[in-house]
Amino acid sequence: MALHLQTGNNQRLFTAHGAGYVAINGHPYRQSVVVTAAAVHTDWPASDFASLDQAHFDYFIALKPEVLLLGTGARQHFAPPQLYRNLVAAGVAIEFMDTPAACRTYNILIAEDRKVVAAILL
């Protein structure tokens, strides 16, 4: 599905998603990615929801988001709270969503100038 949002700056936005990929500013990614307004990070070592551990969540502390959107694939999944307790302690709100919802929500929050990070599992 193609997503379109008009913007005049250099923000990273989801422009499409589908089975096994997301596109950010028109560039397709077929691996798990972390997206902020300023950058796309491909160094997040998470490969699937079942393998997530506390270190995968601690990765986001240095990015200092207000909100972390975790796109869990075609279906929404929830991680045990003990895995992301350090994020909560740092004041980060975390939302678990299916990947299409995470992509849409990220684009909306970026348009509102919110400090949001999207982590997408593929």
Image (tube, rainbow, N blue to C red):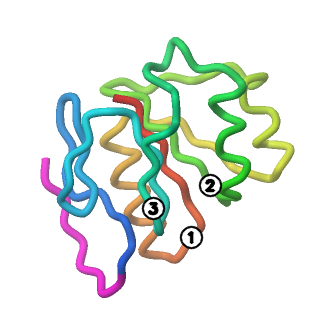
Nearest the eye: 9 or 88: 9
- Identify the residue at image location x=38%, y=63%: 107
Residue wearing tag 2: 67
- Identify the residue at image location x=40%, y=65%: 108
Q: Are marks 1 and 3 in contact (CB under 8 Å)?
A: no
Q: Main secondary structure of the magenta part?
A: loop
* Local SS, label 2: strand
Q: Amino acid at mark 1?
A: Arg
Nearest the eye: 120 or 112: 120
Q: Residues within 10 Å of mark 2 (few under 14, many from 20)?
A: some
Please provide the residue range marked out in magenta.
1-9
- Identify the residue at image location x=41%, y=31%: 121
Mark 2 vs mark 1: which is more N-terminal? Answer: 2
Image location of residue 19, percent across then percent down: 18, 29
> In the rendered image, which quarter is residue 33 located in?
top left
**Mark number displayed over residue 114:** 1
- Image depth: mark 1 or mark 3 in front: 3
Image location of residue 35, percent across then percent down: 45, 53
Assess whether residue 108 is covered by the magenta stretch.
no
Nearest the eye: 16 or 100: 16
**Mark number displayed over residue 39:** 3
Q: Are marks 2 and 1 in contact (CB under 8 Å)?
A: yes
Image quadrant occupied by the C terminus: top left
- Image depth: mark 3 or mark 2 in front: 3
**Farthest-out residue, front:** 43
* Local SS, label 3: loop
Assess whether residue 2 is covered by the magenta stretch.
yes
Image location of residue 22, percent across then percent down: 25, 43
